Image (cartoon, rainbow, N blue to C red):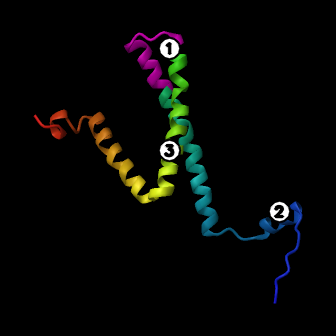
């Protein structure tokens, strides 16, 4: 026996969604969307504060800052595209592990927990 498929209009789909109960899946989607909206402006704010301090510390002029500010967006998109391509062929877990192998020492070094002598031979 074959199931019949009916063409639904946009209004019928909307009404059906309004009648359906909220589930755990809907809560997860809501939380992920809220967190992405929460953290999205963070990179822009950090860039603004970093550029302001670089201007005074390194004596950058406005022209150089105008070039430096938006340079992160293409780099992030290129990195995402390259990592996505690699992850499709190698696997997401392996790609994430390699990424964490680079990020953890870098962040520990930036915070001063690792010194040069800790990971380079004397």
The magenta stretch is 48-64
Q: Residues within 10 Å of mark 1 (few under 14, many from 20)?
A: few
- Using residue 97 as the reference point, say whether residue 119 is left or right of it: left
Q: Residues within 10 Å of mark 3 (few under 14, many from 20)?
A: few
Q: Which residue is mark 3?
A: 82
Tell me the CA gap for discs 1 and 2: 50 Å
Q: Nearer the viewer, mark 1 or mark 3?
A: 3
- Using residue 100 as the reference point, say whether residue 76 is left or right of it: right
Residue placed furthest toward the bottom: 1
Q: Nearer the viewer, residue 49 or 83?
A: 83
Tell me the CA gap for discs 1 and 3: 28 Å
Q: Is residue 85 above or below residue 13?
A: above
C-beta proximity under 8 Å, tags 1 and 2: no
Q: Residues within 10 Å of mark 2 (few under 14, many from 20)?
A: few
Element marked by disc 1: helix
Measuring 59% from the left and 50% from the top, which residue is drawn there?
34
The numbered mark, 3 or 2, whose residue comes first in the sequence reads 2
The numbered mark, 1 or 2, whose residue comes first in the sequence reads 2
Q: Nearer the viewer, mark 1 or mark 2?
A: 1
Q: Position of residue 98 (x, y in %)?
A: 36, 50
Q: Quadrant of residue 117?
A: top left
Q: Position of residue 18 (x, y in %)?
A: 79, 65
In the picture, the disc for residue 64 is 1
Q: Which residue is mark 2?
A: 14
- In the picture, the quarter occupied by the N terminus is bottom right
Q: Is residue 7 above or below residue 80?
A: below
- In the picture, the quarter occupied by the C terminus is top left
The numbered mark, 1 or 3, whose residue comes first in the sequence reads 1
Element marked by disc 2: helix
Q: Nearer the viewer, mark 3 or mark 2?
A: 3
Q: Position of residue 85 (x, y in %)?
A: 52, 50
């Amino acid at each position: 026996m074959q199931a019949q498929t009916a063409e639904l209009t946009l209004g019928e789909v909307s009404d059906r969604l309004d009648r359906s109960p909220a589930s755990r899946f809907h809560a997860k989607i809501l939380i992920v969307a809220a967190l992405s909206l929460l953290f999205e402006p963070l990179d822009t704010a950090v860039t603004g504060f970093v550029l302001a301090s670089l201007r005074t510390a390194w004596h950058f002029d406005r022209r150089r800052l105008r070039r430096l500010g938006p340079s992160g967006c293409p780099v992030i998109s290129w990195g995402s595209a390259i990592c996505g391509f690699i992850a499709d062929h190698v696997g997401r877990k392996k790609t994430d592990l390699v990424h964490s192998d680079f990020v953890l020492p870098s962040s520990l070094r930036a915070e001063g927990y690792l010194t040069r002598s800790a990971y380079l031979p004397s």
